[in-house]
Each structure stands twice: as structure tokens, then as C-alpha cells.
Image (cartoon, rainbow, N blue to C red):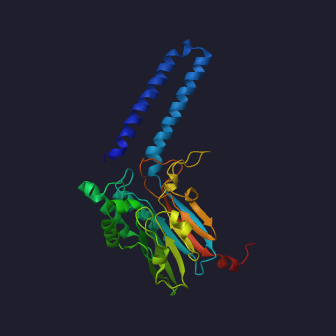
Amino acid sequence: MLPHPHLWPALIGAVLGFALVVWACLWLVKRWGGMGVRRRWVIGVAIALFEAAYWLNIYAWFVEPNMLVVRHVEIVSEEWRGAPITIGVLSDVHVASPHVNAERVERIVQRVNARSPELVVLLGDYAGSHEPEAQRSGREQGEVTYGIAAFAALDAPLGVIGVLGNHDVWYSRQTITRALEEAGVAALWNRHVVLERDGGEQLVIAGIADESTGDPNFTAAFDGAPADLDSIVISHSPDPFAAMPRGPSLMLAGHGHCGQVTIPFFGRPILPLRNRAYGCGLIEEDGKQMYVTAGIGTSIVPVRFLNPPEIVLITLRSGASLEMQPPVH
């Protein structure tokens, strides 16, 4: 299978870069004996730095974006009153973008099912790239459709709940919503669903609209929901977290890919968020909690560095339930 068109420049650069390294090493071997110590040192260091940069680029363009980490996270919430729940979290799949096709989504679904979560949530950006549906080729449209259809194989007792992201609205909110519903995914946009667990215990999952292409409204999302039930908010972007009212046990979000690239000692140079504090991982603020995932795919530049694609498996439990557990000796 040919690489995605967006990867061809990087692939050509990789081949030319490798050829340059080989040529430089051969050139250095021939002239090594006639060089002074200082010149040997300078040229050797230059070649070593170039080679290190070369292999780091190979890793960022072709290796890490194709990795898959299963991240286990336990979150204790004082707002959660029910039995512990395990939630599988997927975000930013970006089907038909570099590194992600329908077959890869199928493999990711299998990995999720192997962890047996009670609930699976999908946090948006199912379509890759930025162009609307009408400007895509039939092949690319089919790739997006087939990739979303793969979610039908997700197997969780409480089902699969999703929200839409900015890429989905740019592509076609109507088409993506229909594809999700045909795959058995409840697509939420400022509304909620009430789920019933074994034993009759109920909980509310509220999904809000994407911030950059809609108006996230917590009041509308919870309108009509029983106030005495445990609740979780799902959102594409983490930025609305600041406006989330107290009450929900947890908010789940994606969108920023954890910056996609993390540079040691410098952090994440690019985060497409208003609040950079919401970039990645578990965030606690004003007694509220949110988990932000790095997601699966890439956007803009198809690279990842120190932010591998991930499935997040969250175990949400009550602080009271921990207090009731006997001490371990």
C-alpha cells in the first residue's frame, strides 16, 4: 500500500538524508588521515548531530505516529457515588489522514474490546484533514465512512457515546452524525443520555457542542436530566472546562493531541487551546476534574514526538468507596 500523499515529501527527504549520511561518512573515511585533530572533531560532531536529527525525524514522522499505548488511569471523585466504572476513551482518530485508515481503526477497536470497558466514549474529530466532504475524492469519503463504521464492533455493556469535533463539522456534521448513528454510537451535541447499569443504577452522560464550530451549553446538555444521578461530561475541546458547573464527576476531552510534539526541557510548543493548562492528562480546578487524552491521529503536520497515540482506560471511583476498603497490611 502506498504511503499517504502527505508523507511523500518526508519519505523522499528520508531517502536523500540517508544517502547524504552515507556519502559524508565515506568522504570522511577517505580524508580522515590527512586532517588535523580539531578539524576531525568539528566534522565528526557535525555529522553526529545531523545523523541524530535525521533519526529523530524518522522516528517522529514514521514510528511514533504508528504506535499505540494503552494508558490506565484511576480517578477518584468526591462527586461520584456509584460503583466504580471503567471507561474506554478514544479521541481524534482523524480517519483518512496520514497514519490512520479504516483498517487501523479496526485494529484499535479490537484493542479497546480486549480491555472490556463498561462504557466507551468517542471524543470527536473522526475525519482527517480540513476540507469539506464535497471537496474530497470518493476514495477519501469512503475511507472516512468505513473508518467510522468500524466503531460498530465496539463491545461495551453500556454502549458507545460520542461527540463531534471541529474537523467533523468542517467535513459535514450531518454526514458524520449519520455515520456514527449507523455504527450504533449515540452522537451528542448539547444533550445527554441516561444509562442504566446492572442492578438498576443509573448515570448521565452529557455531551456538549464543539467550541470552535458550535456553542457548548452545559445547561442545554443537562436539560431534563435527573439531578440526583452521577454524571460525566464529554467534550471535544477541553477549553469549556472552566465553565462546567460543579456536580459532574468528570469531564473527558481531546482535541489538542497533547501538543503532538513535546520537546524535552521546553514542553509543548504548539497547543491549539485557549487555556494551555488544559493541554494533557488529569486537570483539577475548583474542585472539578477533567482528563485530556492525546488521541490517535495527527493534524496539520503528521508527526508525533513523546506523545504516542493512546487508548485511555479510566477507572472512575468514589472517594467514599476507598474509605470503606479495609487497610492493607
Q: In this picture, is 188 found above or below 140?
A: below
Image quarter (top left, top right, bottom left or bottom right) of the C terminus: bottom right
**In the visual, does 31 lie left or right of 289?**
left
Viewer-proximal residue among 314 and 274? 274
Residue at 25%, 58% in the rendered image: 134
Q: Is 280 left, or right, of 135 in this rendering? A: right
Place of residue 279 in the rendered image (x, y in percent of width and height, measured from the top left) = 55, 57
Residue 275 visible here: yes
Can residue 238 be spotted in the picture? Answer: no
Q: Position of residue 48 (x, y in %)?
A: 55, 30
Q: How many marks?
A: 0
Foreground of the two, 274 or 249: 274
Q: Residue at x 46, y 28 (%)?
A: 21
Considering every residue shown, the one lying at the far left of the view is: 138
- Does residue 108 lie above or below 306 as drawn? below
> Nearest the camera: 44 or 225?
225
> Residue shown at 52%/55% (left/top)?
258
| x and y percentages locating residue 13 in the rendered image | 40, 35
